[in-house]
Image (cartoon, grey):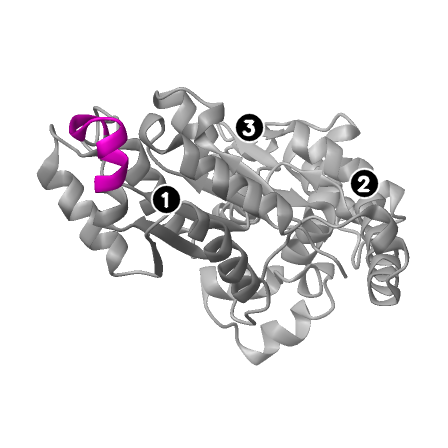
Amino acid sequence: MNKKLQIFVSSTYTDLIEERQAAVEAILEAGHIPAGMELFKAGKSQMKTIKKWIDESDVYMLILGGRYGSIETESGLSYTELEYRYALSKNMPVFAIVLEDSFLFTKAAFHSKDFIFEKDNIEKYEAFKLLVMSKIIKKVNNIDSIEVTVHSTLNDIQYDEDYTLSGWVKSTAINNDPKLINRINFLETENKNLKSQISSPNNKIIGRFTTSELISILSSINLWEKLIYLFGEPSDDILNEIKNFDLYQANALDYFYAMFSYLALGMPHSLFNNNEIDEDVLTMILECAGILVSCDLMVITENNDIILTDIAKKFYAQLLLSNYTPTVNLLHSLIELTMYNLE
């Protein structure tokens, strides 16, 4: 498949206009797409834009002459060096075309030494050049050799298996590629399945969890095990008697379902403030309520009033939509407890 790579071309500007033009023409002749900093003015917001362009490019190419370039005030480095270091940090293909000294002296003869060679930040330029020379470079001694260097280097990069290059491909080429067609069909099917799952009531996001996550969390918490944690292991006689009670088989989801129904019936929110209620029973009920609090389904006030949250209301609605049936119906037990304590 004919894939066009996007090549980001970086350099100082006014002193290397002809060299940049030669590189851009070579990139186009090779069938690729050039991009570069001449589209932007130096500045902080422009640097963000340039980084985005580098992110979207497949290859970064530096042309290094004798100048260091404009300084970015915050870092103290030139924009050219910042671009180069950023490209290196992206682990993308990076190479530099370095102009030989003889090439630079020839250019200086036609312009001026100060126009071609750095005069203000010589140490920074030399340090930057050392960094560049330690990486992949190609030296050139005239403008004509830039075209050959660009062609050969891009060819090497394009067919190097160490690189994964996105590139640009014509839509007609994609339409005719059997592998891509199969891949697209697979992804469309997968996308359809995911959408179906997301639209399912059990996958509706409620607060910090989805409906299915809340069901899984609450169903896994056995209330009887909570009681053992609170009051210790009972004797065998008591255990055999308790096994006949609903609470022995109930989980926290059953408790939520019953508590929501209980309050929906208009039962008192302050039931557990009753001074005559057994202290152990109060401890048990508040412990179970604490599970719902941790899932953002319930709030317990300072007066031990129980208030269901908006998340609880949405969760309860989703349970009804999914035709949920509680393992054990604890509503009757809560109502009986109410009647007993109101006598």
Which residue shows up at 90% across the image and 48% down it? 323
- Report the residue marked by disc 3: 305
- Report the residue marked by disc 1: 63
Q: Amino acid at mark 2?
A: Gln
> How many other residues sit within 10 Å of disc 1, few (<14), some (14-19) or many (≥20)?
many
Q: Position of residue 199 (x, y in %)?
A: 84, 43
Disc 3 versus disc 1: distance between alpha carbons?
A: 73 Å
- Residue 262: image quadrant is top right
Disc 2 versus disc 3: distance between alpha carbons?
A: 25 Å
| Mark sitting earlier along the chain (3/1) | 1
Question: Secondary structure beneath disc 2?
Answer: helix
Which residue shows up at 11% across the image and 37% down it? 122
| Mark sitting earlier along the chain (2/3) | 3
Q: Amino acid at mark 1?
A: Ile
| Horizontal arrangement in the rendering, residue 191 relative to residue 15 (left or right) | right
Q: Position of residue 320 (x, y in %)?
A: 86, 41
Asked if residue 290 is among those painted magenta in the image, a careful observer would answer: no
Which residue shows up at 50% across the image and 31% down it? 304
- Residue 224: image quadrant is bottom right
Q: Amino acid at mark 3?
A: Asp
Asked if residue 109 is among those painted magenta in the image, a careful observer would answer: yes
Specify the principal SS of the magenta part.
helix
Q: Is residue 320 above or below residue 160?
A: above
Which residue shows up at 62% across the image and 44% down it? 28
- Report the residue marked by disc 2: 318
Q: Position of residue 288 (x, y in %)?
A: 57, 49
Q: Quadrant of the N terminus?
A: bottom right
> How many other residues sit within 10 Å of disc 2, few (<14), some (14-19) or many (≥20)?
many
Q: In the image, which residues are magenta?
A: 105-115
Q: Is residue 268 above or below residue 66?
A: above
Residue at far bottom of view: 236
